[in-house]
Image (cartoon, helix red, strand yellow):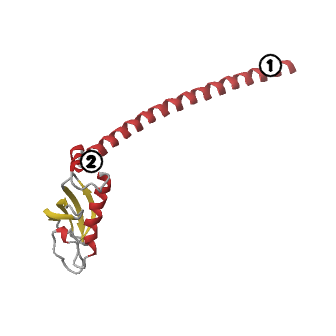
Amino acid sequence: MKKSLFLYLFIIAVLMNIFTYMYFSKQASFEKTQLEKSGAKYKDSLTTVTNQLSDANYFSIENNQNAQNYFDTASVKSFASYGKLSQYVKDKLMSGNDDPKGNLYTGQEQIGGQKFIINKVKVLNHRWIIADYSDGNYWGEVLLKYFINADETVSFEIIQSILHQKMTE
């Protein structure tokens, strides 16, 4: 009886080891498959986001070789790169926010007690800028033309400004 008990216990132990081995090997292969699927999904998502970012930045001086070449041949040589020039132009435009009547390059007169200031600027190429402005209640965009003068000052010209209707609450 003792021998048959040990035999049954040994058989049960062997079966438990076989089932445990099969369970963990199947679980490992399942997790590997799931990881490969999610990795492919994330790679596709990353490709999609990269393409969307590339499309969004199509109109920017950073991706416009012709606009960059313009500054290589321009008379203003103190700007080592278009990135430095782009930041310089943005800073000059944003410095207009210090005016007590608001930034005059928004193309809008002050409505009420708040002044219009430029919030965000994007240099599109060697001639155009698009900017977002607001006074806290009203929002708008402005398309500007800019010029780098020989004395390294920047002059701006408003092409078009649009003020969005105030949303009713």
User: Which quadrant of the figure has residue 49?
Assistant: top left
Distance from label 2 to label 1 (Cα)?
A: 73 Å
**Eye-nearest disc, 2 or 1:** 2
Camera-side residue: 139 or 120? 120
**Label 1: which residue?**
7
Q: Position of residue 27 (x, y in %)?
A: 57, 30
**Toward the viewer: 31 or 88?**
88
**Residue type at numbered disc 1:** Leu
Residue 136 visible to an observer of this rendering:
no
Label ID, residue 56:
2
For the residue pair 166 and 126, the one nearer the viewer reads as 126
Q: Residue furthest right?
A: 2
Q: Is residue 80 left or right of residue 31?
A: left
Query: Looking at the picture, does residue 145 appear above or below residue 2?
Result: below
Q: Earlier in the sequence, mark 2 or mark 1?
A: 1
Judged from the image, the secondary structure of the residue bearing numbered disc 2 is helix
- Looking at the picture, how far across and down is residue 103, in whole percent? 22, 72
Q: Quadrant of residue 2?
A: top right
**Looking at the rendering, in which quadrant would you find the C terminus?**
bottom left
Instruction: Tell me residue 66's x, y (percent).
Output: 21, 44
